[in-house]
Image (tube, rainbow, N blue to C red):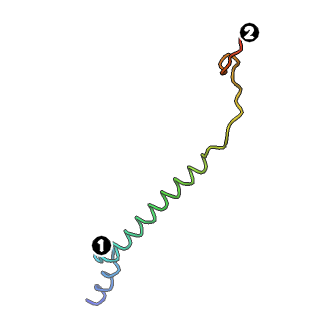
């Protein structure tokens, strides 16, 4: 019976500090990578797509033309 308790405590995250720290390390690495990749995707999605064709009023150009 004592052997059964020992086997289950090796698998338990509360009692086995080595496996729980390894799990938390990989969890942090995964979360950081997901955050970085998500930010890169958003920057790519909202990238500058070039000079838009905007109509400018004649009175606000470099050499204005008035009526």
Which of label 1 and label 2 is nearer to you?
2
Q: Which sits earlier in the primary sequence, circle 1 or circle 2?
A: 1
Residue situated furthest front in the rendering? 63
Estimate the x, y position of residue 8 in percent, counting from the top left: 33, 82
Q: Is residue 1 visible?
A: no
Q: Position of residue 46 (x, y in %)?
A: 60, 46
Crowding at label 2, few (<14), some or many (≥20) Cα neighbours within 10 Å?
few
Mark 1 residue crowding within 10 angstroms, few (<14) / some (14–19) / many (20+): few
Left or right: 29 in relation to 66: left
Q: Is residue 53 visible?
A: yes
Q: Give SS at disc 2.
A: loop
Q: Are marks 1 and 2 in contact (CB under 8 Å)?
A: no
Q: Quadrant of residue 20?
A: bottom left
| Residue that mark 2 sits on | 67
Q: Residue at x 31, y 88 (%)?
A: 4
Find residue 60 and report its image quarter: top right
Depth check: give the residue in front, 66 or 3.
66
Location of residue 24 in the rendering, given as x and y in whole percent from the top left corner: 37, 68
Residue in front for this viewpoint, 31 or 2: 31
Residue that lies at the very extreme toward the left in this rendered image: 2
Q: Residue at x 57, y 54 (%)?
A: 41
* Numbered disc total: 2
Q: Position of residue 38 (x, y in %)?
A: 53, 55
The residue at the point 48 percent across, 57 percent down is 35
Q: Circle 1 sits in a helix, a strand or a loop, which is it? A: loop
Name the one closer to the observer, 29 or 24.
29
Label 1: which residue?
14
């Amino acid at each position: 019976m004592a052997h059964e308790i020992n086997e289950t405590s090796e698998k338990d995250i509360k009692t086995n500090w080595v496996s729980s720290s390894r799990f938390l390390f990989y969890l942090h690495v995964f979360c950081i990578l997901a955050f970085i990749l998500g930010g890169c995707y958003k920057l790519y999605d909202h990238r500058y797509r070039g000079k838009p064709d905007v109509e400018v009023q004649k009175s606000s150009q470099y050499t204005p033309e008035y009526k």
